Amino acid sequence: MAHSHQSRRSYLQSLGSQALVDLSDCCCFRSLSRLGVVVDQILFERQVAQPPLPLDPEILELLPY
């Protein structure tokens, strides 16, 4: 069973982010909560792994602090 879970996770990790978002939405609407949780975890891990976006200097000048 663990092997099947790991292969599914590896396959899901190979998908693009938009495909994962679409799959997460489908899981939500079709009550596939366990698969949805795995997809959401992968999306979260991808987001955390990305470097932060640089701040726009013009916006920084507008901030009051």
Image: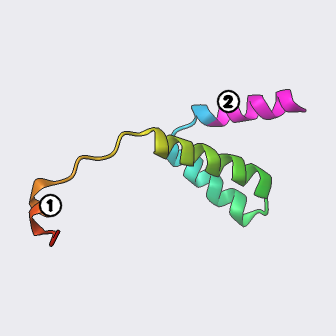
- Residue at 21 percent across and 52 percent down: it is 55
Q: Earlier in the sequence, mark 2 or mark 1?
A: 2
Gap between marks 2 and 1, in whole Å? 40 Å
Image location (x, y in percent) of residue 11: 67, 31
Q: Determine whether, in the image, residue 42 is placed left or right of residue 27.
A: left
Front residue of 35 and 22: 35
Q: Give yes or no for residue 42 being in the magenta stretch.
A: no
Quadrant that contains the N terminus: top right
Circle nearer the viewer, 2 or 1: 1
Front residue of 1 and 56: 56
Could you say which quadrant of the image residue 31 lies in? bottom right
Q: Determine whether, in the image, residue 8 is placed left or right of residue 41.
A: right
Residue 30, numbered circle: none
Question: Contact, CB < 8 Å: mark 2 with mark 1?
Answer: no
Magenta part of the chain: 1-12
Identify the coloring.
Answer: rainbow
How many marks overall? 2
**Which class describes the residues within 10 Å of circle 1: few (<14), some (14-19), or many (20+)?**
few
Q: Secondary structure at mark 2?
A: helix
- Residue at 76 percent across and 30 percent down: it is 6
Image location (x, y in percent) of residue 42: 60, 43
**Which class describes the residues within 10 Å of circle 2: few (<14), some (14-19), or many (20+)?**
few
Quadrant that contains the C terminus: bottom left
Could you say which quadrant of the image residue 3 lies in? top right
Q: Secondary structure at mark 1?
A: helix
Residue 10, numbered circle: 2
The residue under label 1 is 60
- Residue at 11 percent across and 69 percent down: it is 62
Q: Amino acid at mark 2?
A: Ser
Q: Amino acid at mark 1?
A: Leu
- Residue at 64 percent across and 55 percent down: it is 24
In this picture, is 43 found above or below 26? above
